[in-house]
Structure formats: structure tokens, C-alpha cells
Image (cartoon, rainbow, N blue to C red):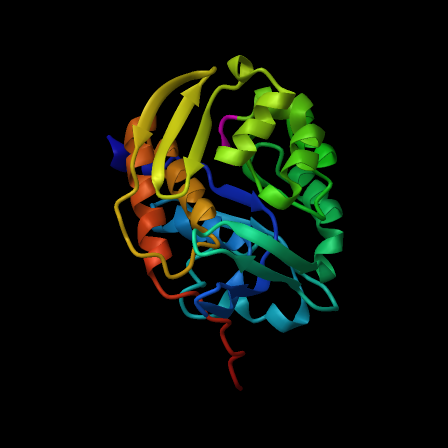
């Protein structure tokens, strides 16, 4: 049955950033790598069997990504290139994997809202995931998706979560799924009654992740224990995997088990290097 569903599943269009990142940990882990929620979430969805397309803007420094080995599995038709530099993040974590400081240069992503609105108007019947992070105009994008009757899910990024959750609140009951960590979930509950939210996936690092449906817990899964090498992107990996499995008919419990397993493998794996442009 799942094989038949795979042929009819809509592509997932992921609105967000693709970036050049530097991660730092007190024990000297981390370093320069490729990053961005739209990238990690799209890659995870593809690995789990769903076609995915980042709706993003690449600067000249990352214009070669669509032809890079390992990234050519993505559908790059929703990306545009702009003159200038791609988004960069400097992410500092503590030993528990909690983000303690972030530095950002948005670069060409300053134009992401305009690009996203144009894309969703061209494809009103699409299925979307919105990475609710600066500099995206979240209210404008969610409002357009709702007006178009598009299916969409969303997630947040803790440094801007309070601002983004408040901006997104009027449209969150229309989301098929929301993804938050434990701290973001507390912020979410301050803004909106969880009883009106169809599906919320709540993660808590190495502790149990749960799924709430209209405020009631319906699934739980503890991530397999893997010593973490890199935690940035783990939540995006979980979200992309969960959405892919749900779209293919998996229950919330089945999808959560697959998603927590994928996130655990992700944190134990080497970071994704920034590929060099091809010569010739």
C-alpha cells in the first residue's frame, strides 16, 4: 500500500534558508559546514522517500550546490540565485547541545519573502513546509498559503521563536503539523490553545519526543542513544523524516519512531562539508 502511495505523494516545497555555517562547542567540536533548515529538512525528506524542493535563494558562493554530489537528489527548481553572499550562521553550543549564542548575516536571503510569495502563487496546489526564521516575513507567507488553501507545516528556531510564534499564531490552527522543541512548546502554549492544533511534534534533545493531536498526546518515542558529534540540524532532520513518512500513510507513532531514529543517526554523523565548485 505504501508503494502505491509513493507515486501519488505531493512534492514537499520547503521555504527557508540554505547557509554557510560555523558551529562551536566547548570541547572544540564543530567547524565550517553547509547548513540551513531548508537544506537539512529537504535532504531528510528525500532520504525517507519523498521528493523535496528547497524554496530558497543562493548567493554566488553557493550557486554550484545543485550540481554537487549528494545534493543532486533534491529538486532545485524552486531555488533562485542572486548576486551577493549566501546566509551565514555562527552557532555556539554548550556541552549539552543547547544553543547559547548565534551570529547571522542574512545576505541574499533578505529577498526570501518576495521569492516565497511568488512561488506559492505560482503553485497554489503545492504542499509546503515553512521554516519560521528571520528574515522570512512569516505572517505574509502563512497568510498567502492559507488564502490559497495550500497544505502547510511549520517549525521554529529558538532564538527567534517567541517573535515568530506570535507572528504566526493566527494561521497555526491551519497547519497540518507543527514542530517545536520543549522550550518553544512552552512559548507556543503562552500564545495559543493547544486544543486547536491538529498535530504538534515536541522534541527534547535526547529525551522522549512526543506527538500531540488537538492537545492530547498520541505518540512518544525515545531517540536511540548515539554520542553526538553535531546537533545543529537534528530537528530539521526529524521534521523532514516525519513529514515524509506521514505523507506515505504512516501513523504518528510510526513516523515519530522513524524520525527520532534519523535524527539520532544525524547527530552522530560527520557534518556536511561545503562542496567546492566543479571545474570546467
Q: Residue at x 45, y 45 (%)?
A: 235
Across the whole image, how many numbered discs are drawn on residues? 0
Residue 217, relative to residue 220: is it above or below?
above
Q: Which residue ends up furthest to the bottom in the rendered image?
A: 280
For the question of whether residue 150 can be seen, the reply is no
- Residue 241 vs residue 109: left or right? left
Q: Residue at x 60, y 29 (%)?
A: 187
- Quarter of the image with the N terminus in it: top left
Q: Residue at x 56, y 71 (%)?
A: 64
Q: Is residue 8 magenta?
A: no
Residue 196's x, y, as percent?
55, 14
As rendered, which of 177 and 269 lies closer to the eye? 269
Q: Which residue ends up furthest to the top in the rendered image?
A: 195
Q: Residue at x 44, y 63 (%)?
A: 72
Residue 151, relative to residue 207: is it above or below?
above
Residue 94's x, y, as percent?
49, 55
Residue 163's x, y, as percent?
70, 36
For the question of whether residue 61 can be seen, the reply is yes
Which residue range is magenta in the image?
A: 176-180
Amino acid at each position: 500500500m505504501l508503494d502505491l502511495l509513493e507515486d501519488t505523494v505531493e512534492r514537499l516545497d520547503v521555504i527557508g534558508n540554505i547557509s554557510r555555517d560555523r558551529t562551536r562547542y566547548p570541547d572544540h567540536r564543530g567547524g565550517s559546514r553547509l547548513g540551513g533548515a531548508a537544506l537539512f529538512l529537504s535532504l531528510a525528506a528525500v532520504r525517507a522517500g519523498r521528493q523535496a524542493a528547497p524554496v530558497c535563494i543562493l548567493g554566488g558562493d553557493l550557486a554550484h550546490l545543485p550540481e554537487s554530489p549528494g545534493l543532486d537528489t533534491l529538486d532545485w527548481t524552486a531555488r533562485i540565485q542572486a548576486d551577493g553572499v549566501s546566509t551565514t550562521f555562527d552557532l555556539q553550543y554548550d556541552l549539552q547541545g543547547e544553543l547559547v549564542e548565534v551570529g547571522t548575516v542574512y545576505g541574499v536571503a533578505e529577498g526570501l519573502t518576495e521569492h516565497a510569495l511568488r512561488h506559492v502563487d505560482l503553485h497554489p496546489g503545492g504542499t509546503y513546509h515553512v521554516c519560521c526564521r528571520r528574515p522570512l516575513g512569516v505572517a505574509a507567507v502563512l497568510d498567502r498559503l492559507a488564502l490559497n488553501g495550500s497544505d502547510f507545516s511549520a517549525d521554529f528556531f529558538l532564538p527567534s521563536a517567541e517573535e515568530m510564534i506570535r507572528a504566526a499564531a493566527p494561521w497555526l490552527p491551519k497547519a497540518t503539523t507543527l514542530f517545536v522543541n520543549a522550550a518553544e512548546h512552552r512559548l507556543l502554549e503562552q500564545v495559543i490553545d493547544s486544543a486547536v492544533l491538529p498535530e504538534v511534534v515536541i522534541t527534547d534533545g535526547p529525551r522522549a519526543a512526543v506527538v500531540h493531536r488537538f492537545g492530547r498526546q498520541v505518540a512518544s518515542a525515545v531517540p536511540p542513544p548515539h554520542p553526538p558529534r553535531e546537533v545543529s540540524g537534528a530537528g530539521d532532520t526529524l521534521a523532514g523524516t516525519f513529514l515524509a513518512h506521514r505523507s506515505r500513510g504512516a501513523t504518528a507513532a510510526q513516523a515519530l519512531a522513524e524520525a527520532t531514529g534519523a535524527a539520532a543517526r544525524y547527530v552522530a554523523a560527520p557534518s556536511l562539508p561545503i562542496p567546492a565548485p566543479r571545474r570546467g
